[in-house]
Image (cartoon, helix red, strand yellow):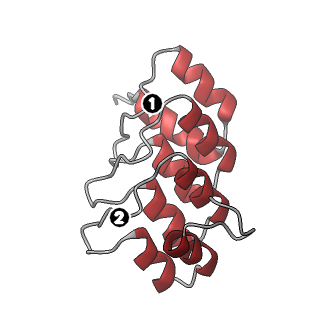
Amino acid sequence: MNVAVKVEDLFTAAAGDGDVEELAALLEQGARINDTDNEGYTALQVAAKKGRDDCVAFLLQEGADVNQRDSDGFSALHEAAFLGHDNIARILLRHGADKTFINSEGATALDLAVRHGNGVIAHMLAEGHSADRGFY
């Protein structure tokens, strides 16, 4: 049985686990920050989906594409808005996340935040302010 594990899968797994040290080690070993895993997700998207603030910040600092989307048009901001990760949405917006992207279902991040009752994120996206009344 051939059990080959691609570095992209290890990289996104580390992002989902919240393991910044492993992300750094894999980058040093040649992992490419914007490559996708076998499911088509980048490490940034996985970290955003799993609520891993430290990993999101680290990946953006290391040059991850804040606006890269999966095959369904979901960006990391879509994931944060859908799942209610306020701080991650704030971090992504501070790094230039495009809040106008429309996914394959015709929804923006704002649409997802409203649809799933994530009012803080909806307010950030609609008004351009964070919950603490400052800008993103």
Q: Which disc number belongs to residue 33? A: 1
The residue positioned 38% from the left and 40% from the top of the image is 37
Nearer-the-camera pick, 7 or 20: 20
Instruction: Classify mark 2: helix, strand or loop.
Output: loop
Residue topped by disc 2: 100
For the residue carrying disc 1, how many other residues have a C-alpha within 10 Å: few (<14), some (14-19), or many (20+)?
Answer: many
For the residue carrying disc 2, how many other residues have a C-alpha within 10 Å: few (<14), some (14-19), or many (20+)?
Answer: few
The residue positioned 26% from the left and 74% from the top of the image is 105
The quadrant in which residue 106 appears is: bottom left
Q: Quadrant of the C terminus?
A: bottom right
Residue 109 percent coordinates (x, y): 43, 69
The amino acid marked with disc number 1 is Ile
Examine the rendered structure and indicate whether residue 117 appears above or below residue 102. Answer: below
Q: Which disc number belongs to residue 61? A: none
Examine the rendered structure and indicate whether residue 32 appears above or below residue 84. Answer: above
Q: In this view, does 61 lie to the left or right of 102?
A: right
The amino acid marked with disc number 2 is Thr
Q: Which of marks 2 and 1 is in front?
A: 2
The quadrant in which residue 89 appears is: bottom right
Instruction: Classify mark 1: helix, strand or loop.
Output: loop
Residue 4 percent coordinates (x, y): 38, 27
Residue 76 percent coordinates (x, y): 46, 54
Residue lying at the far top of the rendered structure = 29
**Does the image show residue 5?**
no
Q: Quadrant of the N terminus?
A: top left
The quadrant in which residue 133 appears is: bottom right
The residue positioned 29% from the left and 59% from the top of the image is 73
Residue lying at the far right of the rendered structure = 132
Nearer-the-camera pick, 50 or 1: 50
